[in-house]
């Protein structure tokens, strides 16, 4: 009995120490971390030029999923299919979703091979929904009401990201700058039944200003790219605030791999006081570190662009071999980085 109590006390102490350490990981941005990655040029060969895309994901087979915006005007009224499955070699395996969406903000594959599409604007009685598609493009589940928005628990206001918990529960982030909308997290069971919501507009602990992307680590904690608050926030699945990290910059995109490596895309940090993007001491780029400790290990500066006004990538993901993919809206491409 005594030995059991000692082990239990040790476990509680370790968990408490981890949380305390995580909460103190608010050091300056890792701008000076080394960069062991190189850019792979012209790696992807799509059947049409990619439109703007702020999201990229990787499935269990290391295939890359991209949701683009069809055309400069978006997907409303377009004949283009915005959801792409691409091999690691850059060949198109699948292109689905024509005529279904207004402005896709994310496409996330699940462990069963389906893809969840977040459509964050509304037009012509479409959009403002999260849709689960089969690999062939068949609609399996829809969350939210098509073309409708508001503060109710059955609608979304500019949904930005979706993540599937280990038990199948569905988490949706909503609220986009500059209005920020509801800026909350909605939780549903695997069938789409509403369970709870947490968060609100604000800058305090547990509050959001444009939760732009979400992801789970191996322990089931929810990481939120709280972009307009310039921090990564961590929550339990019941909405308990655990920690806030600023050292990864102003996060637009976030990805956590099977080793709990944390990838964050900072596409907006600027040194201009008064702007929403003001984040002194942080440079734009990709930061790679630990979801366990919050340490930033690597920093990748922005890739070269044809127009200096183009910001760096917003979306980021990595495959099982550590290759990094980064999606850029204005540059209309997905970059690939490999470790030297």
Image (cartoon, rainbow, N blue to C red):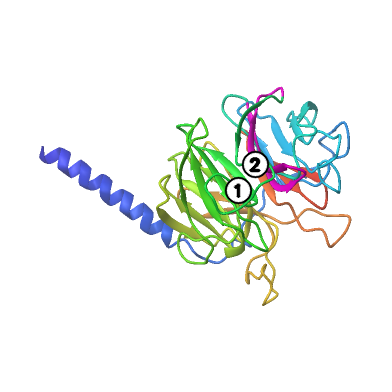
Give the farthest residue toward the left: 1
Relative to 14, 226 lies left or right: right
What element does badge 2 sit on?
strand
Would you identify the image quadrant in which residue 64 lies? top right
Residue 133, percent from left and from top: 66, 28
Residue 129 image label: 2
Q: Is residue 176 visible?
A: yes
Q: Is the residue 111 above or below the residue 182 in the image?
A: above
In the image, the segment drawn in magenta is 114-136
Q: Is the residue 73 above or below the residue 140 in the image?
A: below
Residue 119, percent from left and from top: 69, 43
Q: Is the C-beta separation of discs 2 and 1 under 8 Å?
A: yes
Q: Residues within 10 Å of mark 2 (few under 14, many from 20)?
A: many
Residue at screen point 81% across, 36% down: 43
Q: Is the residue 89 above or below the residue 151 in the image?
A: above
Magenta segment includes 125 = yes
What element does badge 1 sit on?
loop
Residue at screen point 83% across, 51% down: 331
Sooner in the amino-acid sequence: mark 2 or mark 1: 2
Would you identify the image quadrant in which residue 96 lies? top right
Q: Main secondary structure of the magenta part?
A: strand
Quadrant position of the N terminus in the picture? top left
**293 and 92: which one is in front?**
92
Magenta segment includes 265 = no
Residue at screen point 86% across, 34% down: 79
Quadrant position of the C terminus in the picture? top right
Residue 261, percent from left and from top: 54, 44
Quickly name the residue at label 1.
156
Give the farthest residue toward the bottom: 273
């Amino acid at each position: 009995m005594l030995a059991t109590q000692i082990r239990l006390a040790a476990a509680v102490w370790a968990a408490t120490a981890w949380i305390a350490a995580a909460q103190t990981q608010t050091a300056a941005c890792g701008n000076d971390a080394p960069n062991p990655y190189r850019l792979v040029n012209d790696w992807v060969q799509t059947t049409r030029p990619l439109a703007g895309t702020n999201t990229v994901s990787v499935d269990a087979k290391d295939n890359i999923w991209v949701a683009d915006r069809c055309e400069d005007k978006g997907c409303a009224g377009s004949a283009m299919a915005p959801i792409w499955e691409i091999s690691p070699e850059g060949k198109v395996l699948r292109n689905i979703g024509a005529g279904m969406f207004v402005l896709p903000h994310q496409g996330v594959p699940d462990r069963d091979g389906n893809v969840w599409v977040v459509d964050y604007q509304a037009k012509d009685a479409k959009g403002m929904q999260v849709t689960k598609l089969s690999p062939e493009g068949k609609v399996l589940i829809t969350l939210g009401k098509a073309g409708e928005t508001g503060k109710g628990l059955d609608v979304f206001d500019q949904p930005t990201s979706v993540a599937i918990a280990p038990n199948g529960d569905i988490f949706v982030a909503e609220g986009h700058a500059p209005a920020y909308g509801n800026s909350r997290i909605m939780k549903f069971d695997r069938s789409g039944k509403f369970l709870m919501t947490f968060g609100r507009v604000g800058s305090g602990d547990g509050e959001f200003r444009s939760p732009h992307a979400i992801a789970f680590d191996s322990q089931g904690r929810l990481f939120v790219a709280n972009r307009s608050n310039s921090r990564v926030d961590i929550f339990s699945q019941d909405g308990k605030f655990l920690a806030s990290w600023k050292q990864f910059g102003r996060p637009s995109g976030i990805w956590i791999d099977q080793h709990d490596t944390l990838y964050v895309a900072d596409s907006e940090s600027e040194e201009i006081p008064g702007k929403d993007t003001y984040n002194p001491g942080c440079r734009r780029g990709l930061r790679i570190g630990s979801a366990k400790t919050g340490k930033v290990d690597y920093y990748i500066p922005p890739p070269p662009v044809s127009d200096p006004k183009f910001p760096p990538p917003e979306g980021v993901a990595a495959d099982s071999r550590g290759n990094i993919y980064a999606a850029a809206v204005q540059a209309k491409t997905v970059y690939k980085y490999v470790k030297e």
